Image (spheres, helix red, strand yellow):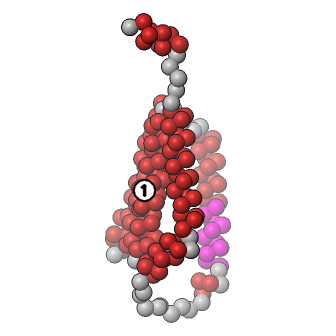
Amino acid sequence: MTVAFILLALITVAAAVAAMSMPRLVHCALALVVAFAGLGCIFLALGAEFVGLAQLLVYVGAVAILIVFAILLTRGSEISMRPGARSAFSGTVIALAVFAVLAHAVMTSRVSRIATTVAPPSNRVQEIGVELLHQYVLPLEVIGLLLTAVLIGAVILAWREKPAAEQEGARTR
């Protein structure tokens, strides 16, 4: 289990670093898909089946693919992201500072010192599914509509009018 976790963690971190540092926007989005998938697999390996499957279905299956489609539809693949050395350095410093603050907060937390008893495993996935489809059905549908609106917006942005010279050339034929 430890070897599998370390392998998944290395793949996820490498994909996340690639998503931040690749020069082409399409490649960054594809590396983000790999990072999302790696995170979902880590959750599955740790025994959090619902969170892992939700990560894979929602982020890899919907959000990341929607990002890739939006980039491709808006011709964002032509844009090259070349961050300067100064902005990359300041981003690294900020990321390390945030990591240090979070690590300090976790290490000094009183919650981590409280002894917990391990509860027997239960079928919480079914309970979460029932709650999603009864109590939280409206937010679930709103998220679906939001993703649909984003896709329609991407198509509208990608839909460019032909120049007048091309339109007249098509009429004369």
Q: Is residue 2 visible?
A: yes
Q: Residue sitting at 59 percent across and 52 percent down? A: 92
- Give x and y (percent) for residue 136: 56, 70
- Give x and y (percent) for residue 121: 41, 87
In this view of the protein, which residue sits in the foreground, 66 or 1? 66
Instruction: Identify the element where label 1 is drawn.
Output: helix
Q: Check disc 1 and report the residue beneath it.
A: 60
- Total labels: the figure holds 1
- Give x and y (percent) for residue 9: 42, 64
Name the quadrant containing residue 60. Answer: bottom left
Query: What amino acid type is highlighted by mark number 1?
Result: Val
Q: Residue sitting at 41 percent across and 62 percent down? A: 56
Residue stretch in magenta = 98-108
- Give x and y (percent) for residue 144: 52, 56
Q: Residue sitting at 43 percent across and 49 percent down? A: 65
In this view of the protein, which residue sits in the foreground, 150 or 121? 150
Look at the image and say whether residue 28 sits in the magenta stretch. Answer: no
Q: As displayed, is residue 56 above or below residue 171?
A: below
Residue lying furthest top:
172
Name the quadrant containing residue 72. Answer: top left
Q: Answer left or right for 153 relative to 42.
A: right
Q: Is residue 29 visible?
A: no
